[in-house]
Image (cartoon, grey):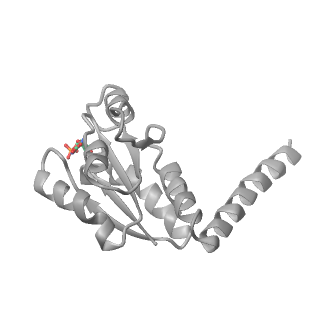
Amino acid sequence: MKVGIIMGSTSDLPVMQEAIDILATFNITTEVDIVSAHRTPEKLFDYGQNAHTRGINVIIAGAGGAAHLPGMVASLSPLPVIGVPVKSRNSIDGWDSVLSILQMPGGVPVATVALDGAKNAGILAAQILGARDSEIQKTILEYKEGLKQKVIEGAKSL
Ligand SMILES: Nc1c(C(=O)O)ncn1[C@@H]1O[C@H](COP(=O)(O)O)[C@@H](O)[C@H]1O
């Protein structure tokens, strides 16, 4: 089981690192790459058409600005694509990225997380894999238990 994590630019890495990190804590293998629909269109086509043949099960795609990367990958790949809108430099407060990833036409879904929500993208990818892998699902249940305990402990310290 492997998650492919792609982003439009190395400048997205500080945000996308959170997806890489959370998947590492779940012991899920990731393959990280920079792919841009605008700047490396041939690489985008190759990635979208072949990711599923290379053993990738879910794709997380992050991009800022006119964020065409997640939607274009979704148009080419049979895999589930999770889109991460990134609030990049010169963005219109991140709305440019949010809307261009969220508002996909019918037939080509991208599961869009919150602005800079790479951590949730990683968790969602793990949950998708966990639907078919009981070990991963167990890890997710433990993670959820940890969240619950933190809230309970926090409430006790009030
Ligand atoms: N949205 C896209 C795509 C794409 O969608 O193909 N390629 C790069 N970008 C975005 O441009 C922003 C600025 O990139 P630079 O920092 O490299 O100028 C980044 O957030 C990137 O995701």
Locate the C terminus and report the quarter of the image it occupies.
top right
Position of residue 95 relative to residue 79, above or below, is above
Please name whichever residue, 58 or 60, is drawn nearer the observer in this view of the structure. 58
Q: Residue at x 39, y 45 (%)?
A: 83
Q: Residue at x 39, y 43 (%)?
A: 110
Q: Which quarter of the frame holds ligand 1? A: top left
Please name whichever residue, 9 or 2, is drawn nearer the observer in this view of the structure. 2
User: Where is residue 63 drawn, in percent x and y?
Assistant: 30, 44
User: Where is residue 6 drawn, in percent x and y?
Assistant: 31, 56
Residue 55 falls left or right of residue 29: left
Position of residue 133 relative to residue 43, above or below, is below
Position of residue 45 relative to residue 132, above or below, is above
Count of residue discs: 0
User: Where is residue 68 drawn, in percent x and y?
Assistant: 25, 40
Q: Residue at x 57, y 67 (%)?
A: 132
- Residue 131 sits in quarter: bottom right
Q: Residue furthest front?
A: 107
Residue 151 falls left or right of residue 92: right
Q: Residue at x 83, y 52 (%)?
A: 153
Please name whichever residue, 76 or 84, is drawn nearer the observer in this view of the structure. 76
User: Where is residue 118 drawn, in percent x and y?
Assistant: 45, 50
